[in-house]
Amino acid sequence: MVEYALNLDYIFASLADSTRRDILRRVSSQELSVGEIASPYDLTFAAISKHLKVLEKAKLIIKRRRGKEQMVRLSPQALANVDKYLEAYRRLWEERLDSLENYLKETEE
């Protein structure tokens, strides 16, 4: 349980940065090399590498070697864990909003 909570901490911390969110968005549709990931940003290669290390530590991406290139792709399991965690809050708010709707309907009558 501690490892699960710690991983969620890493995931949410890594998602707090807009560059990392954009990197995730881009690798969600296709596997990209580190060079392809770095090209649209006005950042050093070292800065992109640090962003990738944060995402990898959070287990949001998977890196593999293809010849001399490092290839990066999304790790869907990490996002599934986040979705599972958020589902409890989603149900809670849906129940509360349903209760509010019922209350408002009763007061209208």
Image (spheres, helix red, strand yellow):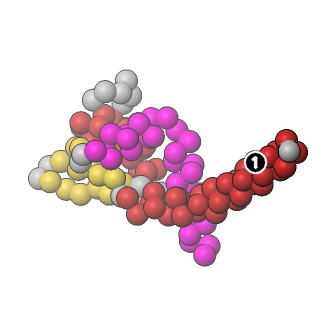
Residue furthest toward the top?
42
User: In the rendered image, is residue 57 in sight?
Assistant: no
Count every numbered label the image shows and give the total. Answer: 1
Question: Percent x, y for residue 57?
Answer: 45, 57
- Specify start and end residues of the magenta stretch as a single range: 1-29
Horizontal side of residue 50 vs 100, given as left or right = left
Question: Percent x, y for residue 76?
Answer: 37, 58
Q: Is residue 42 above or below residue 62?
A: above
Horizontal side of residue 60 vs 16, given as left or right = left
Tell me the residue at 52%/58% (across/down).
83
What's under tag 1, amino acid-wise?
A: Glu
Q: Disc 1 designates what residue?
A: 101
Question: Percent x, y for residue 82?
Answer: 53, 59
Residue 94 lies in quadrant: bottom right
Seen from the viewer's position, the closer of residues 6 and 85 is 85
Residue furthest toward the front?
109
Horizontal side of residue 45 vs 8, given as left or right = left
Figure quadrant of the C terminus: top right
Tell me the residue at 33%/47% (across/down).
28
User: In the rendered image, is residue 96 in sight?
Assistant: yes
Question: Percent x, y for residue 60?
Answer: 42, 55
Q: Is residue 45 above or below residue 90?
A: above
Tell me the residue at 28%/50% (across/down).
72
Please check the rendered image and state whether residue 28 is part of the magenta-colored stretch, yes or no: yes
Tell me the residue at 32%/39% (across/down).
26
Seen from the viewer's position, the closer of residues 76 and 48 is 76
- Local secondary structure at mark 1: helix
Decide: few, some or many residues near mark 1? Use Cα within 10 Å; few <14, some 14-19, many ≥20. few
Figure quadrant of the N terminus: bottom right
- Predominant SS along the magenta part: helix
Residue furthest toward the bottom?
1
Please check the rendered image and state whether residue 54 is part of the magenta-colored stretch, yes or no: no
